[in-house]
Amino acid sequence: MLRYAVKRVALAIVILFTVMLAMYAMVFLVPGDPAALALGPRATPELKALLRERMGLDEPVLMQVWHFFHNAATGDLGYDVWSKRPVLDQILEFFPNTLVLGVTALGWAVVLGIALGCAAVIWRGTVTDRLLGILSVGLISVPAFVVAIYAILIFAVWLRWLPAIGAGTPGDIGSQLRALVLPAFALGIGWVGYLARLVRASLLEVMGENYIRTARAFGLPERKVVFRYALRVAIIPTIALLAVGLGSILSSAVFVETVFGRPGIGTLITGAVQKRNYPVVMGTVLFMTAFYLFIVTAADLLIARLDPRVRDVFRQ
């Protein structure tokens, strides 16, 4: 297990290093001077030189790359070009809102997706199973920002049940929960279909095992066989998908937070891109990549702990 964990962590470090290198190379591949793009055509040469100095673009390329990797390794993601605040402080200020939104969206998607997958297995081969399959595929194909727009139109504009923008009143839990409903719904609805199809496929594979046939031979109801015995094993592949799902949901939150006007990583990186604030963009992307790799690696280690066959495959 230790050998497997070391290999997984080493792979995550290599991926993070590659992302950092590619991300920093983009600064030089994008046409034009970053300082000139940020300040506009009317900026004086002196002001452009000052901004390039703040962004560290006045040094040789190799020195810039070295400083970027060295600072990132020590937790220093640089400073905001305009406010001069540490980038990490801004990320830690906005990230909890995005994390709460992502966990809430994935949480209700997991509950409903597992329920629909189990229901499809219980009534497999029937009209209900076919309808659930059509519903799952339909939910997968709908983009989150489209769901967000229609959710605002229906529940905020027409019915006036929920707020359309914002994160609620600070300190008012009820207001914050109401403001969280629509973004979490728009962000998680696509993953209901993914989870339902995965759980159904995993359950159908497990249902052919000997211990399931033994449970049926004792006359146990089909619902009890599915939920108490089969689901315990069939849920293992879902753990890996949940790790990927949380990372994907946090990435999709950029669009949803923009639509709903919620303060979060999406708002931070969108504003930084518009202002050509490269330290904030690069620091935010690096932080989110590291968080995503941490989740995926933790999920892989958990799966290897639950299923030793995964470690055996990795050794080959």
Image (cartoon, rainbow, N blue to C red):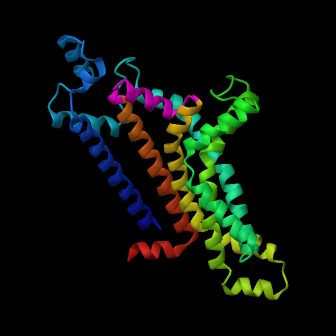
Q: How many marks?
A: 0
Q: Can residue 177 be seen in this snapshot? A: no
Residue appearing at x 38%, y 77% in the figure: 316
Q: Is residue 178 left or right of residue 100?
A: right
**Magenta span covers which residues?**
261-279
Farthest residue in the left direction? Answer: 60
Side (left or right) of 205 relative to 244: right
Is residue 78 inside the magenta stretch?
no
Residue 221 lies, in percent from the top left, at 84, 78
Name the spot of residue 146 as percent of width and height, x first.
57, 43
Q: Residue at x 16, y 35 (%)?
A: 61
Side (left or right) of 181 relative to 289: right
Q: Nearer the viewer, residue 247 or 14?
A: 247
Magenta span includes 264 = yes
> Is any atom of residue 148 visible in this view?
yes
User: Residue at image x 56%, y 45%?
Assistant: 144
Work out whether 116 lies above or below 310: above
Q: Quadrant of residue 205?
A: bottom right
Which residue is located at x 79 percent, y 84 percent? 216
Q: Main secondary structure of the magenta part?
A: helix
Q: Judge by depth and name the residue closer to the eye, 140 or 13.
A: 140
- The answer to which image quadrant residue 44 occupies is top left
Q: Position of residue 217 (x, y in %)?
A: 80, 88
Report whether 260 appears left or right of 177.
left
Residue 124 in picture, x, y percent from top left:
72, 75
